[in-house]
Image (spheres, grey):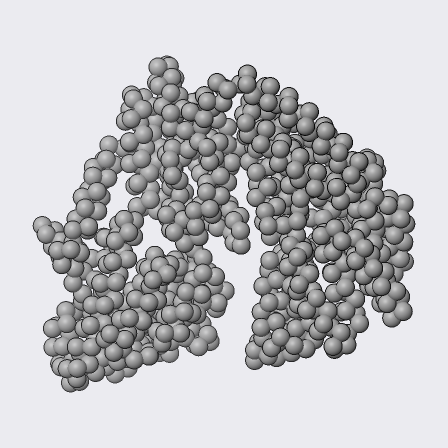
Amino acid sequence: MSTPHDAGSLTALLDEAEALRGLVPQRTYRLAQEVLRLSGQGGPAAARALFLMGIALYEEKRPVEALEVLERAAECAAALPDTVLETRVHNGMALAHTDLGDFGRAVGLHLSNLERSRRDGNLSGQLRSLINLSTLHTHTAERETATRYARAAAELAGRAGLPEFEVQAKHALGFVRARTGQHEAALAVFEDALAQVRAQDLRPFEAMMVGGVFGALSALGRHAEILAREVEFRTVVTPDSPVLARVNLHLHLGTAHAAVGQTGTAEALLQGALRLTQGTELRREAAEAHAALAQVRRRQQRWPEALAALEQARALDRSLLEAAGEQLAALLSAQLAAEVERVRAEELQAAQAELTYRATHDPLTGLGNRASLEARLETLLRGARPFGLLFTDVDDFKHINDTLGHDIGDDLLCQMAERLRRTVGEDAIRFGGDEFIVVFPAVRDANDLLAQAQAVLAVLSPAFEVPGRHLELRASGGLVWAPADGTDPSTLLRRADAAMYVAKRTRAPLVAYRESIEAAVVARLDLDQALRRALDQDEFFLVYQPICDLASGRPTGVEALVRWQRPGHGVVGPADFIGVAEDNGLILPLGAWVLRGACRQFRRWQHAGVPVRSLAVNVSPLQLADPEFPGLVQGAQQEFGLEAGALTLEVTERVAVEDLYDAGRRLSSLRALGVRVALDDFGTGQSSLSVLRRLPIDILKLDQTFVRDAPDDESARAVLGALLALSAGLGLSAVAEGVETEAHCQTLLALGSQTGQGYTFAPPLTPEELLGWWTGQGL
């Protein structure tokens, strides 16, 4: 984009948002919101942006908010004037009124739009109005009128060669059939529309058609077909699909799994449907999910929870049906009341079963708990067959809880539990926190055990959907083989936990227990305890490595590096203790000590006349995620008198891989304080070039692995040259790390590099050593 307000660029953004309608409504909303901001809240771009924001809110079933935004869009469109856009806006308003049960207002808007579109020759507007009128009359039980509108739309779209409207008209016709109980006919219509969508690559409508097929199959009781096509449906309905499509996916899959006796899977899916309906107007779908959940809990003999679900379903159904007719509402209310009474009688007979269940199952995930695990292990150990046990948890789960909140954390745990349940059934146990145990009661040998454990960890690899984002988690696992690795539950669990710790430290996904592991765990515990004492006992100190101009060798700044004078061990480098500090939470006070100490030394050099122009300090992702960190940085700048641009904070690629949006927002807030941001060790992690383009950084630090072989290796030079060209093209400064020889300097200069650091200039030095080195440079 050449300028923020370039009309062509705004149109391109709006076209992208339009293309994502029906596919990724949240992305549509964000793109349109950005256009609204850039357009200054007025003009054609603002009107279209407001329309797309309102439609995205409608697709997320938030009609009240949608109506507010669409009314603003209508004012903008009327002022232009733009009758085509005004017609689209009024259609959107009518849809929102329909969701809110204001059918009179909705009909009036649709009929007005239909007349305007016919007068203006706006064929798309006519088709939208006809389709929406069909859907509205289906809601009000005027089936014949609804059918006429749907058929008229299908015929008009077919004659005009507009397949995107033709398939929507077919969907409206299928909706009429479904609401009149003609489920076989509805299924035929939906399948025909789905085939047309796929044949003509009308992807934005695929989730809509899949939902229709799903609903018809569910109404016909053809649950085996639903399960047979589950992978197909999950491929179409993604975490970015409109909320109604996602709710229907959970609801119909949950009903199908319940029908074949898979109650654990069914319960998780139905609870997922209910979570998705929160904050929306999908009351009918929520009622259906509660009613289905009541049936699942009856099968599980969880009587109080079944009763609660039925009462919630009855309340929701009554409020829905009152809008359509008091007589039908009273009928359903009476049916549900009878069911409630029957459940209450059964509850009295099943009180003991409920207590037993609660004693042996985790209340959050529904998996077996520690008590059930110990009983299971005792039984297996008394048997003659060997078995395996996997101890696993999520890396950095505490960070997720701290930054996104415990509700998100609980949601993730439930989703993890469901994946484990679907993979190994009742052999999955929630041990506590984010720790899960999987028991493998039937294994042939160690290789078979390893393969089964790897398969379990693999199901935790795909991204998890939580409100507003997708999270990719990394699970670490420790594996034991019984009875070889232990003959009692306590020993097996302790050794599996130790093996998992080694997996975390080595970044290996899975580690099998061996005798040397327990010694490593003890050493790590000693290191943890020593670190906790080190900060209080002033065992840390800072050294500084110059960053120099490659051509002249003159220093342009310094990088602060922390060292630990550990008693009995000598000087310990950060690679040996920073990871432990991040695990035990000491990274925050240690990082604050490093930042303030480096800034204090920078001021001393300034007062002494040493021309150190810039100071670089390394920052952990956990520091960056700390909401208090910007205040700490600003306080250090003010206390020690650092001017804007004097302080550089170095972050690694890891911050972008974990959460690009959050990292970008936090880095931008730091840059607003006059801090420069450097991306350290670039090229050694997992970030992509697109991530690099989107991060608000000033400096790219090229890892020493690219520099080391460049003088003698043509391919290494080519890669290094490409990285330097990339940084220049993005307007970033580049600093080469690991400049150890004169050959390194000359190679970098020949490739266009200007700045570097390494032992060819100076190693990391204490403040006193750095002052002597600086004087020796004649500065």
Total numbered circles: 0
Q: Is residue 278 left or right of residue 655?
A: right
Q: Decide which of 22, 348 is in the foreground and name it.
A: 348
Q: Decide which of 600, 187 is in the foreground and name it.
A: 600
Say whether residue 743 is visible: no
In the displayed structure, 250 sits above or below 26; it is above
In the displayed structure, 507 sits above or below 609; it is above
Q: Decide which of 64, 488 is in the foreground and name it.
A: 64
The quarter of the rendered structure image containing the N terminus is bottom right
Residue 509 in percent (x, y) is at 38, 42
Name which quarter of the figure residue 45 lies in: bottom right
Name which quarter of the figure residue 29 lies in: bottom right
Residue, far left: 568
Say whether residue 46 is visible: yes
The quarter of the rendered structure image containing the C terminus is bottom left
Question: Which residue is painted at 88% across and 52% down in the image?
Answer: 149
Question: Which residue is painted at 58% across and 69% down in the image?
Answer: 34
Residue 205 in percent (x, y) is at 72, 52
Q: Decide which of 253, 107 is in the foreground and name it.
A: 107
Q: Is residue 273 left or right of residue 598?
A: right
In the displayed structure, 206 sits above or below 603; it is above
Question: Which residue is painted at 31% across and 35% down in the image?
Answer: 497
Residue 327 in percent (x, y) is at 80, 36
Question: Which residue is painted at 24% across and 32% down in the image?
Answer: 515
Residue 291 in percent (x, y) is at 65, 33
Q: Is residue 536 left or right of residue 301?
A: left
